[in-house]
Image (cartoon, rainbow, N blue to C red):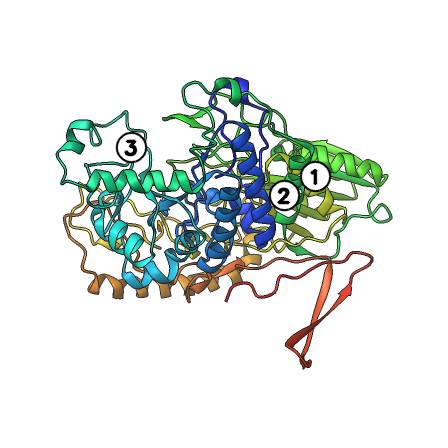
Amino acid sequence: GNGFRASEPSLVGTVTVWPSPLAVASTWDEDLAGRQASAIGREFVGKGANVILGPAVNVHRVARAGRNFEYLSGEDPYLGARLARGYVQAVQREGVMAVVKHFAFNEQETNRMGESSEVTDRTAWELYYPPFEAAIEAGAVSVMCAYNKVNDTYSCENEALLQRDLREAMGFRGFVMSDWGATHSTSVQEGLDMDQPGSIDPWFSEEKLASLKSGLVDRAVERTLAATFRLRLDEYPGCDSPNCLGVQQTDVTSPANRALAREVATSSVVLLKNDGILPLEAGRVKRLAVIGRAAATTPAAWGTEVHGNPGLPRGDYYSGGGSGHVHAADVDTALDGIARRARDANIEVLASAGDDVAAALRLAHEADAVVVVAGTTTVENLDRSSFRLDGEADHLIFALARVRPTIVLMQASGAVLTPWRHRVAAAACLFLGGEATGHAWAATVFGDVSPEGKLPIMLPASSEDTIEPGVPPEPEEPHKHHHEKHGHHEKKKEKKHGHHDHDPSRKPHDEAEDGDHKNEKDGEGKKMEEKHEDLVEVRTLREADTGAVVYEEGIFTSYRSQVFKAAFPFGHGLSYTSFRYGDPKISTLTLTHAAVAAASGATLGSAVEGGCP
């Protein structure tokens, strides 16, 4: 659902590298999300394709999950439902089947082939199902079942999941396909209609299908054909693999799509903090230092894979890694965009595209202000190892913030820690903005637009304010309690305070400045430990199950938790405009809520109303 993925080097550069679904979620804009989905659909049609494996609508549970950048819902079911509905309608209007994924509870990459998500009905229906329900109500013709088990049964052979919940309760009338290699049996009776890719396992062989009860295969075929006829794909079938290379080499990019990519990326920028330094103006800043290795990083080259994950492209600061990666021939980097716009503003740019603190400090002393561009990368099949920005970015930010007003721009694949947030003049986040990243940063930093993005996730105050991926227990220690093994909320104890507000560049005596934050975190940590001691007494897990991931927090993830603290809360996002909401006024026709916007300078903005509860 991220865009058309090149299957060979000759296709790189022939499609638009769009902002990620998580970036789209940051716009909170159904119309804009739908316009991007329509454009993606047209590019697919231009490539001879009639099925898109998306949208991915899983609600985030594990904040450092490797595929969070792909999930349109962020951490909220209502936001996900609103955006999923528009995406499905838009892409299917273009004659492309939407395959909504990953059903269900595929909220982590760790042990994704073997873990069993243990979920109650209340948690499923209130938190994780609504985006799927909305997509089905919008007419989605296909759903993809996930790799993981659900309550000890693989998703693609889980009758309760596929028949009871999906077909009977949600009213789904389309066909269910498996994720690639997620089939473990000839599970047509349980609700699976199509095994993908069909060539790596025997489960849907002619012999095995012939052994099923009469009528089961016919009904699976009927559901698949009905979806085909509904979108009139029998009349407009596209190309027939493997004879698609010719049409796939078509360049489907266009000025209109490039303009839309710039619009979506710019609308996705979330301004987290601003002490008044933004927007930059020549009257206050004559020389601007742009620093950080993410500032000018080129896209990942074709064939660059993650070690130990053959076939999965490495992610970069523009498109996440894995099967959802879209290779770019070229991108507008942060340095490109800022330098170009700075010339128009008669501001000189000094650049150091690296994390060398000594070199950065020398450059910063020559400038009036500093922009640090930092990022995180991620890839399918692996959860991120930490919430830190890549390389030495945190160290760099702390050092630079001591000598010059510092603006931090983050190109992130999901939640990150911001231990320097109290020290910097401004900070903003873009969740993998695609090929137009540089344009989005320039337009925001120089005030060509007022930032409109809102966080679709919570940025945690510390790593303790998140749910960890569940992992199998260590076999040599079978006597341990489950809460010590599965990692739901619990943290390694070698550092009591995690990474909360830790400045790696400080001398030991400087750390007293953060004492208040650390003591505050100590109290929260004790509360969490007490909470989990209670939970372990009432847990009813199978002791022998080595892959159980218990959703013991129920619906209380992210901002719904009474324990977790946010550095920047879900829904947060500043603008260059101040808004004042007045008292409701009754008109003759409707009850309206009057809003008076007081513009800051000449920059106007808009506010999202109605949003999520």
Q: 331 or 402: nearer the eye?
A: 331
In the rendered view, does 448 fall on the left or right side of 495? right
Q: Amino acid at mark 1?
A: His
Mark 2 and mark 1 residues within 8 Å of each other at the beta carbon: yes
**Residue assigned mark 3:** 181
Mark 2 packing: few (<14 Cα in 10 Å), some, or many (20+)?
A: many
Q: Alpha-carbon distance for marks 2 and 1?
A: 8 Å
Percent coordinates x, y for residue 191 in the rendering: 25, 45
Find residue 428 and report its horizontal and vertical position in percent: 63, 49
Residue behind mark 2: 265
**Location of residue 407 in the rendering, given as x and y in whole percent from the top left corner:** 68, 47
Extreme residue toward the front, this view = 235
Is 471 in front, or is 364?
471
Question: Going from the N terminus, do you reach mark 2 or mark 1 first?
Answer: 2
Splitting the image into 4 quarters, where does residue 355 fall?
Answer: top right
Position of residue 174 measured from the top left corner of the image (x, y, whole percent): 35, 46
- Residue 111 visible in the snapshot: no
Res. 207 visible in picture? yes
Amino acid type at mark 2: Ala
- Of the numbered discs in the image, which one, if any, rests on residue 439? 1
